[in-house]
Image (tube, coloured by chain):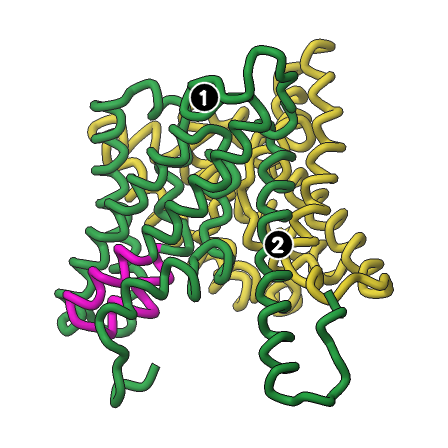
Chain colours: A yellow, B green
Amino acid sequence: MGDLVWILVSAAVVNNFTLALFLGLCPFLGVSGKVETAVRMGIANIFVMVLTALAVWVLNTFVLTAAPFLRIIAFIIVIASLVQIVEMAIKKLSPALFRALGIFLPLITTNCAILGLAIFSTNRGYGLVEGLFFAVGAGIGLTIALVLMASIRENLELADVPDFAQNMGLVLILAGALSLAFMGFAGLFSAA
Amino acid sequence: MSPAKKPPPSQELIKGIWRENPVLVQLLGLCPALAVTNSVANSLAMSGAVLFVLLGSSLLVSSIKRIVPTDVRISTYILIIATFVTIADMILEASVPAVHKELGAFVALIVVNCIILGRQEAFASKNSVGRSLLDAVGMSIGFTLTMVLMGTVREVLGNGTFLGYSVLGPNYEPWVIMILPPGGFLTLGVILLVFSWVKRRSAARDKVASSIGGPAVQEAA
């Protein structure tokens, strides 16, 4: 059990997907303007990541044992179609949930965070339960990063920034500062 | 772009290097630009892989553009890209295992690199094979230049070396943070700020030159 908690915490803060591994930068830079949007994007991400973990486990256990070199192709296609199907199911079953998450789902599908999750958990040889914990941890980490960034950027709108800095450059510097702060969590490694 | 008037072929090559630089102007492919630029060697290996994948997919996509149904084009492109990425992954693993190990999952992640899919959708699917190849080469050069620039800054500052050779002497205290993740964000951030400052300054100068007597905006920067 301790191991599972460790996997979750490690993926969420120590090896934060966005701030330490640079995965999921598109949503991180693209939709981090408002806190509310960031939260919804984060939740949608956790959701897709859990689906991905399930799909990856099934593929790795039953399908790809015969042809491991087809991994990249298989992951991409299966994850993309799975998300598409689930999106249709949600639209039918729960229009409210669809309105909240719907527009984000197709955007996330071919996001590097999702494929990264699939490849990392394969490389580390995670089983089903470990993979699920890893996915939830990574999703939480992504949500934390998104929400932090969005909160900073909401305040930034009121700040008097020089003209030339009103673009991604400044956001990246902020991301660097956040990433620096998150490096502090690396100390958890020795404690575990 | 309008199909009626096409720029000369040389433009397709040059635009990717500066005016439409994939990383600095279009902000695409940031994931590899930040993740693997902690040394010049890694940056070069990554750029090589991207060049290969981009050339291969542009070639294939522009040659089959007439027979791919519009509804499934994106899936088709992704399949083509994933195939080339698998090949690149295998070649790297076989020829330079050490570098492959260091790049890790990021080679596989070229599949979801927006530069590649973006060029297929925006360019290769609408242009001739020759132009698409020129475009792919131009974009790759732009990408490579940015990657090498970042790799150089980070390796020299963070490790005191360039391609493994010491350049700052034995007394240099390495600025370790530059080769760690925050260094990637900071380096790219600073590069983007300088880039936009230069652009704004030259734009302001043009404006002043064209309307003498108007309020001087040159000091805005």
Vertically, is A182 above or below A125? below
Check the picture and name the quadrant holding the C terminus of chain B. bottom right
Q: Looking at the image, can residue A137 be seen?
A: no
- Residue B48 percent location from the top left of the image: 29, 40
At a point 25% along the width and 38% down the height, the residue shown is: B86
Chain under numbered label 2: B
Q: Nearer the viewer, residue B221 or B127?
A: B221
Going by the image, does A2 lie left or right of B102? right
First to last magenta residue range: B116-138
Vertically, is A181 above or below B61? above
Q: Nearer the viewer, residue A52 or B197?
A: B197
Is mark 2 in CB contact (under 8 Å) with mark 1? Answer: no
Going by the image, does B99 lie left or right of A35? left
The question of residue B168 being in magenta is answered with: no
Toward which corner of the image does residue A145 lie, by quadrant?
top right
Give the SS element for disc 2: helix
Chain under numbered label 1: A
Going by the image, does A66 lie left or right of B166? left
Q: In the drawing, what numbered circle is on residue B194?
A: 2
Check the picture and name the quadrant holding the N terminus of chain B. bottom left
- Residue A23 percent location from the top left of the image: 53, 41
- Residue B168 percent location from the top left of the image: 55, 21
User: Dot 2: few (<14), some (14–19), or many (≥20) neighbours within 10 Å?
Assistant: some
Amino acid type at circle 2 is: Val
Q: In the drawing, what numbered circle is on residue A124?
A: 1
At a point 45% along the width and 50% down the height, the residue shown is: B29
Q: Main secondary structure of the magenta part?
A: helix
Q: Do the residues at pointers 2 and 1 share their chain?
A: no
Which mark is in front, 2 or 1?
2
The question of residue B118 being in magenta is answered with: yes
